[in-house]
Amino acid sequence: MREIKFRGKDIKTNEWRYGYYKKDSNTIPNILRAAGLAVTNELHFIDGFLIYGETIGQFTGKKDVDSVDIYEGSTIEWFNAQGIDDGLATVFWDKDRSEFDIENDDDNILEPLYNVVGSCRVIG
């Protein structure tokens, strides 16, 4: 079973933040760190970051050739069977196929992510 975690870009610093995802009642997305939990009447997250909603990506459960986590929205460089660079692609969730896939800048679906995990590198 894969770990459920997210990433998003911090509104203040524009840095990637990693942890749990929460969208509160005022609709501001947050990435929350597990270390900052306290329990009162309900679960509260003490340590979190406001993030740009459009940058939210869920962990795919896969890692690249350098053991870097691959997230939805990650930009990857991928290689064919001969080790030749096949270009850049973006990871996305394909709801019709119920899988993470990669697509190029022309929105062409290139491959299911699981086909390229051993031959890709996260670059963004």
Image (tube, rainbow, N blue to C red):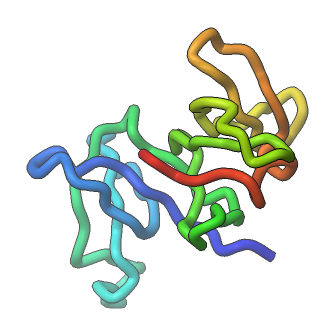
In the rendered structure, the answer to whether residue 90 lies left or right of residue 54 reads: right
Quarter of the rendering occupied by the C terminus = top left
Q: Position of residue 118 (x, y in %)?
A: 77, 60
Q: Residue at x 64, y 62 (%)?
A: 64
Which residue corresponds to the image point at 90% horizontal and 33% vertical from the top-left?
97
From the top left corner, tell me how far across and down residue 98 is, in percent: 86, 40
Q: In this view, does 85 lie above or below 9?
A: above
7 w.r.t. 46: above or below: above
Depicted 63 relative to depicted 85: above or below? below
Residue at 86% from the left image edge and 46% from the top image edge: 81
Depth check: 61 or 52 in front?
A: 61
- Residue 25 visible in image: no
Q: Can residue 6 be seen in this view?
A: yes
Quarter of image, res 82: top right
Residue 42 position, x and y percent, is: 41, 79
State the image coordinates of residue 87 (x, y, percent, origin top left): 61, 30
Q: Nearer the viewer, residue 114 or 1?
A: 114
- Residue 40 sits in quarter: bottom left
Count of numbered marks: 0
Query: Given the current orientation, which residue lies at the most extreme top position?
Result: 106
Tell me the residue at 34%/47% (across/down). 29
Q: Quadrant of the N terminus?
A: bottom right
In this orientation, which residue lies closer to the viewer: 121 or 43?
A: 121
12 to the left or right of 122: left
Residue 65 in the figure: left or right of residue 110: left
Q: In the image, is residue 47 above or below residue 122?
A: below
